[in-house]
Image (spheres, rainbow, N blue to C red):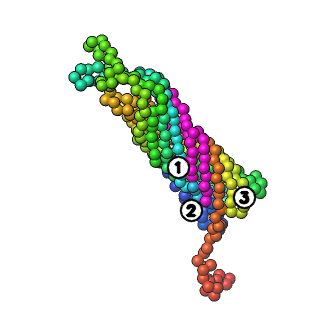
Amino acid sequence: MKKQIIFGFGLLLCTAMQMEAQKSVADQYLHFSVGVGDHNLSYNLQNGDHSGRAGYSLNAAYSYFFTPQWGVQAGVGIQSFGALSTLNFQSAEPATDADGDSYVFRDAYKNWQERQRVLLFEIPIEAQFRHPLNKKVQLQASLGGKVSFPLQTSYKTVGGEMVTTGYYSQWDAELSDLPQHGFSTYTGSYNGHLSLRPAYMAIADLGGLYKLSDKLDLYVGAYFNYGLNNIKKTSAKLIYQSDGVYNGMLASTQTTKLTPVSVGIKVGVYFRLAKKTKVTITDKLPTGTRPTEPAQ
């Protein structure tokens, strides 16, 4: 449903732009910007906590103002997101050893830290409103949505330790410090890639335009992006399995929902294109061949 709302909003904007393009004059711009801020992969960790990381965004867009105040903008961009997780708990999983004996595989995490990073390729569509404050400065606000596709994803453990043991209830014994059987203390680095869905986000910008010349404006403002859907794929895996496979926190049962959220500031430039003037068929006819109004 959220996807249909975003696409419907984009279709409405495109239709309005096409209808208003029949008017005689329109302001058009090419826009380039860079932003930095808190770009968080937001999720709930069942037995730990996490914090967002700093990120960046790069955008290129085309703006069409069909009135002095109202316009639309569409473009492309990339945006980075990240998070750092810390775990302190013990998991337990039924398992069977090489001799066919059943046991409970226990895994104790002590300040175990994992960092996740995601780079998204984005296609935004926004409605824009601007209001002049004086001859040099205009207030500008944008509101819309975008679809974002995972371009690069990764995770890496960066600290803490993980202690694995095996509990055999039939002998009431817990085995440890047996690396050949998978029972040991691990402090090494694990890394891999995340499997994520496309993200649908609501976006908003608020800032000011400063006129540098007749064809160039400087833009400085703030932005907010909020994920509308869960981009994590369902998984019933443990973070670390008894067979030695490390799946990572975002591919495990420790997390159930993942949404990207970002807020920050950005700086950009607006290049004014030549104003578009409507040309009719009669304008192209030689002077003596243009139709005239019948005499009354």
Q: Is residue 158 visible?
A: yes
Give amino acid for label 1: Ile
Query: Helix, strand, or loop for circle 3?
Result: strand
Mark toward the start of the polypeptide (2 vs 3): 2
Query: Helix, strand, or loop for circle 2?
Result: helix
Label 3 belongs to which residue?
212
Magenta residue span: 30-59
Label 1 belongs to which residue?
78
- Examine the rendered structure and indicate whether residue 73 appears above or below residue 250: below
Q: Is residue 105 visible?
A: no
- Examine the rendered structure and indicate whether residue 51 appears above or below residue 204: above
Query: Helix, strand, or loop for circle 1?
Result: strand
Tell me which secondary structure the magenta stretch mostly adopts.
strand
Label 2 belongs to which residue?
18
Residue at 57%, 47% in the rendered image? 57
Looking at this view, name the residue that lies furthest to the right: 134
Residue at 55%, 58% in the rendered image? 14
